[in-house]
Image: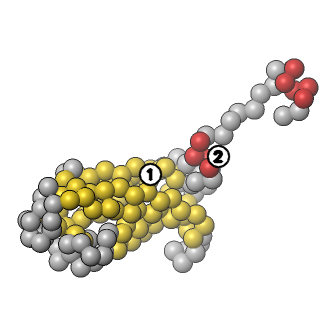
Amino acid sequence: MGFLDSFLGKTEEAPSSDAAKGTPFKMTLRFSPLRLTSMKDNMVKLVVNVQNVSGDAQLVSVDALLPRREMVGFDPTCINKHVEKKVGELASGESKEVVIPIWGSNQTKAGSYPVEVKVFAHYLNYDKVINYVRKTTSLRAV
């Protein structure tokens, strides 16, 4: 915007906050049900909502990571601490939900467990990463 444009009343649109940061996605996380029951074999679902806020279609995958030494996992035996879900291509403005089960066992203690979730934008195939968004949340076991 030039000096004279301010006098003539010309304005520029400000880019959206997500586009200004250069992040291709808006991500929200939630658990269903809200908590894991400790000292019991049960499961909660981590629901990851991914919205493409970039102007282009994106090839998307979602990764989730749990702490290694804790008795929570992505399978009923609580051994698998990392999971990757290939979402596919998201058009501009499109959103998808990815459901990831998190299991507890009869050895899961009460407390708060950190869960790290990353959403990746890929180039051509799932081997190359263009950009990613990361969030960390905590899962409560009571």
- Of callouts 1 and 2, which one flags the residue occurring earlier in the amino acid sequence? 2
Q: Residues within 10 Å of mark 1 (few under 14, many from 20)?
A: some
Placement of the N terminus among the 4 image quadrants: top right
In the rendered structure, which amino acid carries the disc numbered 1? Met
Q: Is residue 129 visible?
A: yes
In the rendered structure, which amino acid carries the disc numbered 2? Ala
Q: Which residue appears farthest toward the right when viewing the image? A: 4
Give the SS element for disc 1.
strand
Placement of the C terminus among the 4 image quadrants: bottom left
Looking at the image, residue 48 sits to the left or right of residue 45; the answer is right
Judging depth in this view, the residue of 123 and 7 nearest the camera is 7
Instruction: Kindly identify the residue that appears in the image at 25 percent across and 64 percent down.
Output: 101
* Residue pointed to by mark 1: 27
Looking at the image, residue 31 sits to the left or right of residue 12; the answer is left
* Residue pointed to by mark 2: 20
**Label 1 with label 2: CB-CB less than 8 Å:** no
Q: Is residue 44 visible?
A: no
Looking at the image, residue 15 sits to the left or right of residue 43; the answer is right
Location of residue 134 in the rendering, given as x and y in whole percent from the top left corner: 47, 59
Instruction: Kindly identify the residue that appears in the image at 51 percent across and 74 percent down.
Output: 126
> Which circle marks residue 51 in the picture?
none
Q: Quadrant of residue 40?
A: bottom left
Q: Quadrant of residue 8?
A: top right
Judging depth in this view, the residue of 60 and 135 nearest the camera is 135
Location of residue 70 in the rendering, given as x and y in whole percent from the top left corner: 24, 72
Q: Residues within 10 Å of mark 2 (few under 14, many from 20)?
A: few
Judging depth in this view, the residue of 47 and 80 nearest the camera is 80
Give the Cα distance between marks 1 and 2: 16 Å
